[in-house]
Amino acid sequence: MFELDLRSRAPIYEQLVDKIKELIINNVLKPDEQLPTVRVLASELTINPNTIQKAYRELEYRGYVYSVPGKGNFVRATVPDNNAARLQTLEREVLKNVSEMLYLGMSPHDITTLIQRSLSEDKGGKVHD
Amino acid sequence: MFELDLRSRAPIYEQLVDKIKELIINNVLKPDEQLPTVRVLASELTINPNTIQKAYRELEYRGYVYSVPGKGNFVRATVPDNNAARLQTLEREVLKNVSEMLYLGMSPHDITTLIQRSLSEDKGGKVHD
DNA sequence: TGTTCTGTACTAGCATGCATAGTACAGTTA
DNA sequence: TAACTGTACTATGCATGCTAGTACAGAACA
């Protein structure tokens, strides 16, 4: 399903959360689609099932996944609702990154191009199909 | 000088690195300006001097600071030179953040406005004549 | 019904890393 | 010389990530 960097400083469960969240955002994992079971994914990635479960619980807490005991974990159709705080964090992050890009010598024009490209390349759930 | 979040999951020395780097990028700390000494900053923030030193060493390794034994730590005038890899990381990060902003319902127009605003608000740490 | 899948909830142990305290030494400056 | 500076150690306490192992309840199905 994806790769992990076991040598990274970032905890495995957090890498899992990040990658799965990304797949959901980019509509690779569709709403109500079942995720791999805890045990299956654990044996595929050769890590401990507890680590997978920790990632799934975190994803559920953040509103990206719901779990049905006895059945499995599934992609939530609705977008998490505390957008305001999250959006504010994202904005700050982007501003900081843009500042550093300028500091490192990237031109405002190239930065604008980068953003426009990402806006038109949106893989979002509403387009395609 | 700044505040720390002792309850954060992020290590103190890493918060220090991040904040000082930000001050340098935004030209609040000018080139060749002396940073607070290890011991002074430690007592101001009521943390251990070793933690400050760890942050300063990290900043030196990343090219933002140089240290003169017996004198102190100073802001480096030149921009770090392995820009390519760092810029690539920043680009990926920005693309990911923009994707999530779209997913959370922010409009492309608002995102564009945000970026343009940050580009014109540049505090010009480095002028690339 | 019984089997096997699913999620969930524990305990325990190990390794790693952060932060601390403490001590020490060399270079710089007044 | 005295009082700064950075730097380099050791040792300790503590939190956390990850693992192993065990156990139990709900769901699906032959």
Image: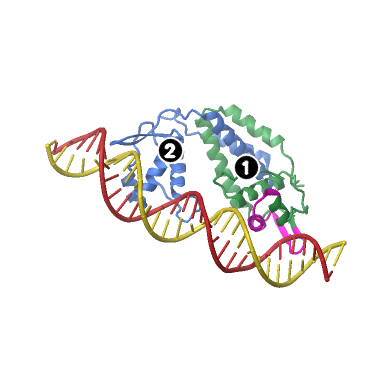
Chain colours: A blue, B green, C yellow, D red
Whole-number angstrom distance, CA of label 2 to CA of label 1? 25 Å
User: Residue flagged by tag 1: what amino acid is it?
Assistant: Asn
Residue carrying label 1: A97
Q: Is residue A60 visible?
A: yes
Residue carrying label 2: A59
Q: Is residue A107 shown left or right of residue D26?
A: right
Q: Is residue B122 above or below residue B81?
A: above
User: Residue flagged by tag 2: what amino acid is it?
Assistant: Leu
Q: Which residues are magenta?
A: B44-72
Q: Was residue A127 drawn as part of the magenta stretch in this picture?
A: no
Element type at mark 2: helix
Q: Was residue B60 drawn as part of the magenta stretch in this picture?
A: yes
Q: Residues within 10 Å of mark 1 (few under 14, many from 20)?
A: some
Could you tell me which residue is drawn at 56 percent across and 36 percent down?
A: A117
Near-viewer residue (C3 or A117): C3
Could you tell me which residue is drawn at 46 percent across and 29 percent down?
A: A79
- The image quadrant where one finds the N terminus of chain B is top right
On the image, the x and y values in percent for residue A126 come to 45, 27
Q: Is residue A8 shown left or right of residue A70?
A: right
